[in-house]
Image (cartoon, grey):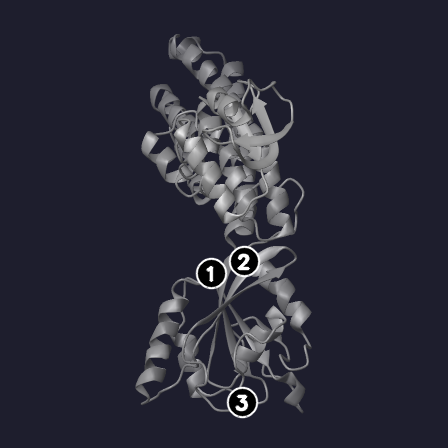
């Protein structure tokens, strides 16, 4: 079909892998546009199929004419992710590499783009394939041992089995930790700013973002809604959420903002509890601290240290950092601590992009290997847990992947890509 389309637009058979500078012809042989036509013969193309590429001048009207001409010659509109899906189905890419294409397009930081390139180039896939290879070798050993009575199994084989299992478990653990770093680069982390009104939450958001994102006022209750801003710290995306000040209020709109603050806290990966360092602790501060979700990490930020004349308060039960959102004092230290608390290890080299499904698969494989270790003296059960662990790892590269999962993955790509 691609060859027929190329012939119809070029007016003759194209030369493979040759740039034709030519008129693009309509059904009557009249020029629509002028540009470059390239024809790639299968399997030497991105998708592994015959592919024709047209490079024109652009413009809405011209593109519509070219699109109608291609459709008339038998083409159909591409669906989201269709080219990359075809490349995957034709074994030009595995599933992790295919996802790397979308992640590279969506990358918002330099580090994220570099990690996506590593996934696209197959580094993540290579790591997973190595883990699978190790598992296969262990399963071969276990299956061979199953063919003999227990008393005939040599101690050297048991030691070899135990050593291989320990090595694989360590490798999966390290891969999971690396994948978490890649997932952080891809998804970022959500950081909520909470505290009483007028403690400087909006000022801190503006300072961290480097621009005037939120209104700053001496009037308590200025922030009524959650204000979100994505920032980057050392290439790691952080979604900062400035929330309404927490206090007792009779203002119905402010109360709605306070309710939204509590809802936002449940979705945060980290909570920054802001206090005015120039004021003593109050019952309101203690009440806010009591209301914070206990399962979410928190950091106490003592703001307005430029107004302090004496010693800063030293809370006994919460880690704290002193800053001045107005002058910038202590902000660099806060940025560094934010990265630590969201799990960034600052080891960019070797990090590949990872998605939530990759983390789930690696976590499941780690769990199955732990169960295998627990039943290691029951060969049949041990072998089954190893098989399940391998299946989890295989789902990452798509060696065994359900069609409905493929549809979900590629539907998130941009049109055509």
Q: Please state if 412 lies on the left or on the right of 163 as rendered.
A: left
- Place of residue 299 in the rendered image (x, y in percent of width and height, measured from the top left): 53, 69
Secondary element at tag 2: helix
Secondary element at tag 3: loop
Q: Residue at x 33, y 75 (%)?
A: 259
Separation of marks 2 and 1 at Cα, in angstroms: 7 Å
Q: Are marks 2 and 3 in contact (CB under 8 Å)?
A: no
On screen, 28 above or below 417?
above
Q: What residue would you read off at disc 2?
A: 342
Q: What residue would you read off at disc 1?
A: 269
Q: Residues within 10 Å of mark 2 (few under 14, many from 20)?
A: some
Q: What residue would you read off at disc 3?
A: 280
Mark sitting earlier along the chain (2/1): 1
Q: Which of the 4 quarters of the picture holds residue 153?
A: top left
Separation of marks 2 and 3 at Cα, in angstroms: 29 Å
Q: Nearer the viewer, residue 80 or 73?
A: 73
- Place of residue 411 in the rendered image (x, y in percent of width and height, measured from the top left): 39, 40
Mark 2 vs mark 3, foreground winner is 2
Secondary element at tag 1: loop
Q: Nearer the viewer, residue 72 or 146?
A: 72
Asked if residue 341 can be seen in this view, the reply is: yes
Q: Residues within 10 Å of mark 1 (few under 14, many from 20)?
A: some
* Quarter of the N terminus within the rendering: top left
On screen, 134 above or below 207?
above
On screen, 16 above or below 170?
above
């Amino acid at each position: 079909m691609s060859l027929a389309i190329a012939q119809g637009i070029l007016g003759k058979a194209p030369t493979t892998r040759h740039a034709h500078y030519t008129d693009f012809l309509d059904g009557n042989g009249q020029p629509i546009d002028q540009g470059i036509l390239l024809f790639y013969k299968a399997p030497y193309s991105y998708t592994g199929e015959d592919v024709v590429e047209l490079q024109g001048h652009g413009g809405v009207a011209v593109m519509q004419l070219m699109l109608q001409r291609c459709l008339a010659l038998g083409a159909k509109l591409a669906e989201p992710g269709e080219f990359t899906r075809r490349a995957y189905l034709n074994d030009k890419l595995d599933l992790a590499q295919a996802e790397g294409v979308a992640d590279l397009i969506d990358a918002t930081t330099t580090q994220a783009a570099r990690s996506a390139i590593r996934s696209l180039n197959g580094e993540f896939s290579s790591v997973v394939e190595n883990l699978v290879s190790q598992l296969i070798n262990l399963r071969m050993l276990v299956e061979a041992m199953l063919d003999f009575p227990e008393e005939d199994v040599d101690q050297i084989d048991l030691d070899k089995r135990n050593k291989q299992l320990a090595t694989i478990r360590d490798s999966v653990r390290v891969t999971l930790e690396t994948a978490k770093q890649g997932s952080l680069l891809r998804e970022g982390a959500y950081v909520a700013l909470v505290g009483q009104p007028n403690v400087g939450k909006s000022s801190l958001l503006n300072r961290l973002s480097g621009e005037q994102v939120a209104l700053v006022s001496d009037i308590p209750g200025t922030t009524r809604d959650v204000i979100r801003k994505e920032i980057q710290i050392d290439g790691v995306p952080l979604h900062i959420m400035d929330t309404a000040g927490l206090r007792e209020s009779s203002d119905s709109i402010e109360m709605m903002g306070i309710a939204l603050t509590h809802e936002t806290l449940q979705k945060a990966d980290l909570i920054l509890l802001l206090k005015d360092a120039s004021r003593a602790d109050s019952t309101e501060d203690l009440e806010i601290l009591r209301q914070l979700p206990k399962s979410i990490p928190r950091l106490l930020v003592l703001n307005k240290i430029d107004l302090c004349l004496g010693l800063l308060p030293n809370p006994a039960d919460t880690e704290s950092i002193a800053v001045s959102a107005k002058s910038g004092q202590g902000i660099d230290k806060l940025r560094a601590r934010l990265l630590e608390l969201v799990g960034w290890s600052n080891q960019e080299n070797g990090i590949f992009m990872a998605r939530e499904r990759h983390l789930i698969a690696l976590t499941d494989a780690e769990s199955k290997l732990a169960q295998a270790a627990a039943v290691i003296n029951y060969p049949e059960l041990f072998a089954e847990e190893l098989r399940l662990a391998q299946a989890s790892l295989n789902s990452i590269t798509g060696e065994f992947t359900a069609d409905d999962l493929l549809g979900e993955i590629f539907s998130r790509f941009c049109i055509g890509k």
